[in-house]
Image (cartoon, grey):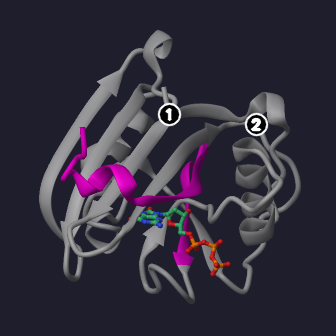
Amino acid sequence: MPSSDNNNIKSIVEFTLIFVRSDEGVLLGFKKRGFGVGKWNGFGGKIEKGETILQGAMRELKEESNLTVSSSNMIYVGYVRYDRVDSPQVDIVYIFTASEFSDSLEESEEMAPKWFKISEIPYEEMWGDSKYWLPIVLRKKGIFAEFLLSGERNMVKKNVEERDENNIPVYGE
Ligand SMILES: Nc1nc2c([nH]c(=O)n2[C@H]2C[C@H](O)[C@@H](COP(=O)(O)OP(=O)(O)OP(=O)(O)O)O2)c(=O)[nH]1
């Protein structure tokens, strides 16, 4: 039967985002250009053609911070789905954490990295949705979150679910 639910024909663009942990807290980067400029966030970006989600996440971390995390130390914790009432595009952001890494931290053209104590995470200088799901990730729980945004990122609807490790959401399933 023909459907009037245009959500089903939106195009999907996939991104990665990683939150690296150490004794110093969590590593965030101050975005110096492009999407999210002037905000703190984890490290990540668009998944390129021909690479896996995991490869994309590792490549973006390297490009933006110079840190290397081996694939076996990458922990996938779930994803966040961003839909917009006024756009035909849906963004899927795959979230990772890692606490084992090598190489020295370096500022990149795109990101200025800084360690934050968990109690000092600058949520007011991050994307507004982060405060709803990042605390869950930092408690080492899985996450499924979806946000419907309009205009300049006004939140129209939100759904945030904490997931157990045996119920980590995989996009498309
Ligand atoms: N697309 C998108 N990304 C988001 C949102 N919230 C959020 O934290 N992110 C994250 C996911 C990515 O790590 C990052 C956006 O990636 P980006 O635009 O910097 O991608 P990129 O590095 O490939 O950029 P570029 O080379 O094309 O400039 O922000 C959101 O609402 N939409």
| Quarter of the view holding residue 47 | bottom right
- The label number, if any, that marks residue 100 in the structure image: 2
Q: Position of residue 98 (x, y in %)?
A: 66, 38
Instruction: Check disc 2: other Cα within 10 Å, few if <14, some if 14-19, many if 20+.
Output: some
In front of the other: 79 or 26: 79
Which residue is identified by label 1? 172
Amino acid at circle 1 = Gly
Q: Find numbered disc 2 in the image and state the secondary structure of the residue it sits on.
A: loop
Q: Which residues are magenta?
A: 1-30
> As displayed, is residue 156 above or below residue 171?
below
> As displayed, is residue 134 above or below residue 13?
above
Amino acid at circle 2 = Glu
> As displayed, is residue 88 above or below residue 145?
below
| Quarter of the view holding residue 126 | bottom left
Tell me how far mark 2 sits from mark 1, CA to CA. 29 Å
Q: Position of residue 37 (x, y in %)?
A: 47, 85
Q: Position of residue 96 (x, y in %)?
A: 59, 41
